[in-house]
Amino acid sequence: MKSQFTGTVRQFLSPIVGFLDDPSVSEIMINAPDEIWVEKGGKVERTNIKFDSKDALMSAVNNIGQFANRRITKENPRMDARLPDGSRVHVILPPCASKGICISIRKFSKDPLTIEKLLQFGSLTEDSVEFIKACTLLKKNVMVSGGTGTGKTSLLNVLSSLIPNDERIIVIEDSAELQMQQDHILLLETQVPDRQGKGEVSIRDLLHSTLRLRPDRIVIGEIRGGEALDLLQAMNTGHGGTMGTIHANDPFGALNRLETLTLFSGIELPLRAIRSQVSSAIDIVVQATRFHDGSRKVSHISEVLSLGEDGNYHVADIFRFNKTGTGEGGRILGSLEPTGTVPTFWKELETSGQKISRDFFVKR
């Protein structure tokens, strides 16, 4: 298969071009010029490929930075960038990376995931898709939660495809990765500061602008800073149907993470007030999990309930992955099943035209 890009960047990355061309490789991890690992089929393996020298690898880094209009120096030893095909790159220089120049390349797929593919892979079920679709049409706020490498962004991309085509969707990202299919899309991307430290535009800045641009839907690639408070306030004041991703290992962790990120806003609020905002803003958490066999699945679809009298979060799993065994080659067997818990907004679902009643949630 031919590479999705050509030119100078490809020449400087010539030792790993084979991996860039290989559709089965999802990530390339360079720990040092002579230590390169790849992820294939969810499994990470070391290769025998190497760069000739640290200078050759540094030339590749500089070329990527030049293409992406990013600078990396001893004073600024970290860089986020993209390759010409859209693949995401992160670089760390020594001495922060003690082995040598460290690069991670998360490859961009020209063949994105779809609902149909997730059903085929067993990551979702038809019932769970119907539920999420109904929640989307009802403009419930949905957070996709997951750890590193669980496919949060890909899952968000799939779920966002359920947004009706006649709505104005504003997408906010650090690096453009989402591949929205609707007609009315406005894509906003952050900007790093220049050499004088000026001109930075953060996700929080873009969110402030978004609220003045008449969005029907807001989709945020990843919530990772003080913008969490602004987003929660937006969701609590009429901006329903918001979607985003957050780094957490379970639905409870997603709420705790949002709580922590609001503290980065610099606005002091009582803990109970923060928790009240989180619990009233987020309706559904879709948890992405990477299992030990390398497979990525949705492990929970959970409703966030009202804050308890004890001041703690309360979450009800509507669907949960049920492991039934281990198949050939250690492959995990199981499926996403209803838990028997009926969501508190089931009346809305029943009257939404989606033909979802209380019986839909009966444990099979």
Image: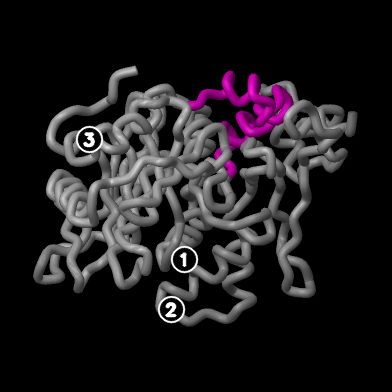
The span from disc 1 to disc 2 (Cα, nearest Å) is 9 Å
Residue located at (65% from left, 37% from top):
297
14 relative position to 128: left or right? left
Badge 3 marks a residue whose secondary structure is: loop
Q: Which residue is farthest left? A: 196
> Disc 1 or 2, which lies upstream in sequence?
1
Q: Residues within 10 Å of mark 2 (few under 14, many from 20)?
A: few
Read off the residue under disc 1: 229
Numbered badge on residue 267: 2
Numbered badge on residue 84: 3
Per the rendered image, the range of residues in magenta is: 113-140
Vertical placement of residue 164 versus 315, above or below: above
Quadrant of the rendering where the C terminus is positioned? top right
Q: Amino acid at mark 1?
A: Leu
Name the mark nearer the viewer: 1 or 3: 3
Q: Position of residue 259 (x, y in %)?
A: 57, 68
Q: Are marks 1 and 2 in contact (CB under 8 Å)?
A: yes
Q: Amino acid at mark 3?
A: Pro
